[in-house]
Structures are given as C-alpha cells and as structure tokens.
Image (cartoon, helix red, strand yellow):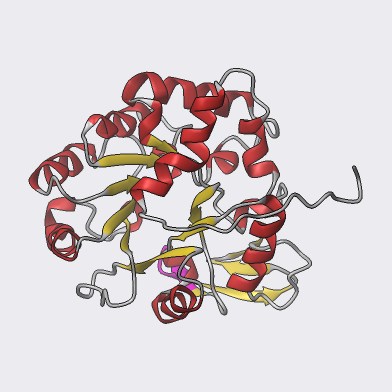
Amino acid sequence: MIDAHVHLWLEQRGTVGGLPVYGLGGGRSMFGNEVVQMLPPYLTDGVNSAERLLSCMDFSRIGGAVVTQEYIDGNQDDYLRRVREKWPERFRVTALYEENGLPETDGVDGIKICAGRLRDRDLAHHAAVFALAAEKDLFLAIDMADGEEQTGMLRELAQQYPSLRIAIGHFGMVTRPGWTEQIRLACLRNVYIESGGITWLFNAEYYPYPSAVRAILEARDICGMEKLMWGSDYPRTMTAITYRMSWDFIEKSSLLTEREKQQFLHENAYRFYRFGNLPELPLIHHMAE
C-alpha cells in the first residue's frame, strides 16, 4: 500500500493565522493561542521523524509514503531532501510553496501549495508555481479552501498545464459544503484526489467511519475510482486512532470491491507518484491477536 499524505519534521516551527506553532513536549504544541495534542503523547520529544514513520509503515505493511507539508509545521524542505536521499524507494517528498518566491526543487518530487492558507487566495496570482512544476515534471499537491472558492481557477490552471500531475488533498474537504465541486476537478485527466485527513473530518463519527466510506463511493461515482488515493494525514490523526485504523476501515468495508480497494490503497498512487520497487513487508502479528 501507499500512503499519499503524511507529514514529517524534526522540529515543528510554523504559524497559523499569523501566530506561532511550536512543540511543548509530550506530543503537545502551541497552536496559535491554544495548546493542542499534535502528536501521540508517547512522542515526548516532539520529534516526528522518518524512522518513526517507517516503523509504523513496516508494521502496517505500507510500502511507500508521500510527505506533504503545511505552514503549521514550518518549512521542512531541507529535512525532506535528506529523507528522500536516504530512503529513495520508500518516500516521495514535496517542497513547500510560500508567498516569498518559488521553492527550490532540487531533490524533491513535488511542490505543496497550502491554497486555503494563502494570504492571496486567488490561484491566478500563483500561476508561476504551476508553470515551474510543469517545467520540472513534478507533481503538485494542493489543499484547497473549503467548497468551490478556488475550483474555477484550479480548473483553468490544470487545463493550461495538461501534463502537470495535480493531487487535491483532504478529499476535497469532504465534510464542508460544496466539497463535490473539488471532486469534479478529478474528471480532468491530470487531476487526482487523495484522502489525507478524512478520518479527521469524520472524527465526530469515529471508526469505522461509515460516512467516510459513503463519501468515497460518492466521489467514485463522480470521477471514477481510478482517480482516488488513500492518505492517512500521519501523525496528527494518530492522536485519535492507530496508523492501521487509518486504512483498515477501507479494507474491511463490504461496500467496496477488492479491485476498488486495490486501486484506492495502492495502484492509483503508485502510478501518480511514480514509485518503483517497493519492499515486500511480512505480516507481523500483534499481541492483542
């Protein structure tokens, strides 16, 4: 399987709404003006490293992962380049686009745009980053503002750069009004949808997330299962569930065919992010079995 949406950092130093985000220990972070549980509490030092994620991936038999970025974590470009260099078969990584110029793209596979957090949310004013990604043959990961605020402009940019691979995150902000307009963008040949954060968005319902499964089926009927990819949003969602729970509610669902599960959990992301040889990971039984 391939996880299309994870985060990594050695030290969290970001911003939200112009206020700082930083680790406090015990997995907690100062998030603007409140303290939140950002990591599982046993990660007491605040380090969210590739080694720790790989341990979770190996236990859950996840072959590869795509490391996206967020302003709330701070720019992690340098660390992610080292991660990509050390484990080239396991990771694909992004450079973070910020509104102070174009990112350096050496040693990365894609560019991340936190479109919903941009000061200027008109994507037409950020066309240069789309052009850069297309020129360098990188994928573009984008978390959009809720609903259809930015869908018209993204449609225009996706059509302007038809060879540019675009992955819309957070399953189009599925619990917000107008989310299907983001899904409809995946009817374009070069646009895909990844589900990172879907368990966060349906957290009030909790595992096994029947409404999330129904949303996946609704998206399938709009753009086709071949355009949808699974993502965990590790490590933030791991404050509520285990890593394994972030995907096995899909595996255990009787509403999806085995072929659809294979597409969603592996095949689509393998093709989109251009993974190569992934390791064969053995099944490790846990102590509760």
Quarter placement of the C terminus: top right
Total marks in image = 0
Residue 281 % position (x, y): 66, 55
Quarter of the figure with residue 17: bottom left
Left or right, 207 with respect to 140, comes to right
Q: Is residue 16 inside the magenta stretch?
A: yes
Instruction: Report the magenta residues as a range.
Output: 14-20
Residue at 59% x, 40% y is 199
Q: Nearer the viewer, residue 56 or 31?
A: 56
Question: Residue at point 60% right, 52% down?
Answer: 62
Between 116 and 43, the one nearer to me in the picture: 43
Could you say where residue 193 lies in the image, as x and y percent from the top left? 37, 39
Q: Is residue 144 visible to us here? A: no
Of residue 113 and residue 14, the one placed in the foreground of this image is 113
Q: Residue at horizontal 44%, vertical 73%?
A: 84
Q: Nearer the viewer, residue 242 or 256?
A: 256
Residue 209 picture location, percent across and down: 64, 30
Left or right? Give the position of 103 relative to 171.
Answer: left
Residue shown at 13%/46% (left/top)? Answer: 157
Farthest left residue in view:
160
